[in-house]
Image: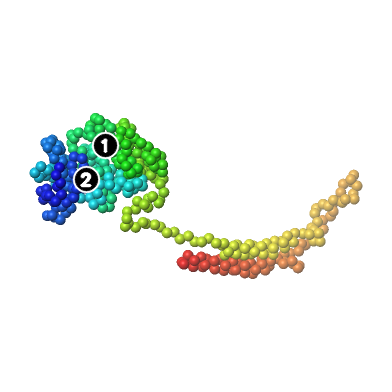
Amino acid sequence: MSDLVNQTLGQYKVVELLDDGGESLIYRGYQPGINRTVLLKVLKPEVAADPSSKQQFLSQAEFVSKMENPNILPLYDAGSSEDFVYQVEGYAEGGPLSKRLDEFHNPLAALSIIAGITVGLEYLHSKGHVHGNLNPANTYLSDTKEPLLSDFNYPGQSSESISPYRAPEQTYSGVINQQTDVYALGAILYSMLIGEPPPIGAVVSPRSRRPDLSDEVERVVLKSMNQNPDYRFQNAREFTTALQNALQPNDAQAAVALQPSGSPVVTQTVQIQEKGTPWGSILVGVLLVLAVAVILLVVIPPLRGDSPDDSAPVAPTQTQVVEDVPPTEAPLPTPIPDAPVQLPEPGDGDSPSLGDRIRDACPSAAAIAVLGFGSMVYSENRKRKAHRE
């Protein structure tokens, strides 16, 4: 195929060859009428010579042009010029994923790509279409690293070519469905984690190449690439959800690495007061204990003195036992005096009353309580001042 650089296809000028897409060549183009950079996919002449391949290429362009999804590369135009058939797509500033695999070595960074591809695949599947040709070379990246799907499998196109991203049943039987897209998605994840495509026709343990990967992540990769489609994830969403769950235990530092450049990392600062010895609280407790002790020492012992002692007169009982009476004789009753012995009235004599004692103790207890309250107020003021600072 002759070099098309600096030539014109319709209204588009061919600027630079970007990649060889197998059946087509990928160029950076320019649309001067509206000053827009575009992506030109030019079908190779030997492929375009087949009328059915040429028609499939143009039919695919018509189908894709009707799609509106943020993870599908938009298609603006399609046509032919002399011997060349071409498609005009939006230009992805980030280029193809195949040239930037090393940027998504981190599993969480790889998840961001997988999640975007999944959105595009779900949209395709909802329209009754299957990608059938999913790989890093036709997955483009925007300037914000958003994946954009391109180069879908043509309806009825043969899938006999061998690729690390093609499921076995697709390669050998031509079967394409959601499970074949899941296989390709798992192979893309493998490529990002390991840095190169998986071997063709074999499933190699990712942890044999990267022991730092978790068992959970490895199980997700191996299940997505199972040789039997019945044992794979049944759709892209199921696969992506399993990968998200496998990455849940990862530490916060890996999540911060995924933060888009220029976006502020939101953090929450919590002010923690320095814990020291709570002298104010201890002092208040000591003073309160002293106040209670004063009341107990001043009031309780005199209360015990109110009980009759040996020198206090005792009111006679109805009978008294006479120790010297012979046991054979019954004790004689002691006559009850005409007037009962008068017990001292409360407050009589030298012993102060209970009320007097409490009144005497109150000033001391009150003074101690005041000191305790003052200390508590002083301690609280210091805490508030430290908190404001």
| Disc 1 secondary structure class | loop
- First in sequence, mark 2 or 1: give its number: 2
Q: Residues within 10 Å of mark 2 (few under 14, many from 20)?
A: some
Residue closer to the observer: 136 or 320: 136
The image position of residue 355, as x and y in percent, is 67, 66
Judged from this view, the residue extending furthest toward the left is 82
Q: Residue at x 41, y 43 (%)?
A: 212
Judged from this view, the residue extending furthest toward the top is 173
What's the residue type where badge 1 is placed? Ser
The label on residue 81 is none
Q: Residue at x 35, y 39 (%)?
A: 221
Image-based side of 311 in relation to 193, left or right: right
Pointer 1: what residue?
Answer: 163
Can residue 175 be seen here? no
The image position of residue 141, as x and y in percent, is 26, 49
Can residue 6 be seen here? yes
Judged from this view, the residue extending furthest toward the front is 2
Q: Residues within 10 Å of mark 1 (few under 14, many from 20)?
A: some
Image-based side of 139 in relation to 341, left or right: left
Pointer 2: what residue?
Answer: 19
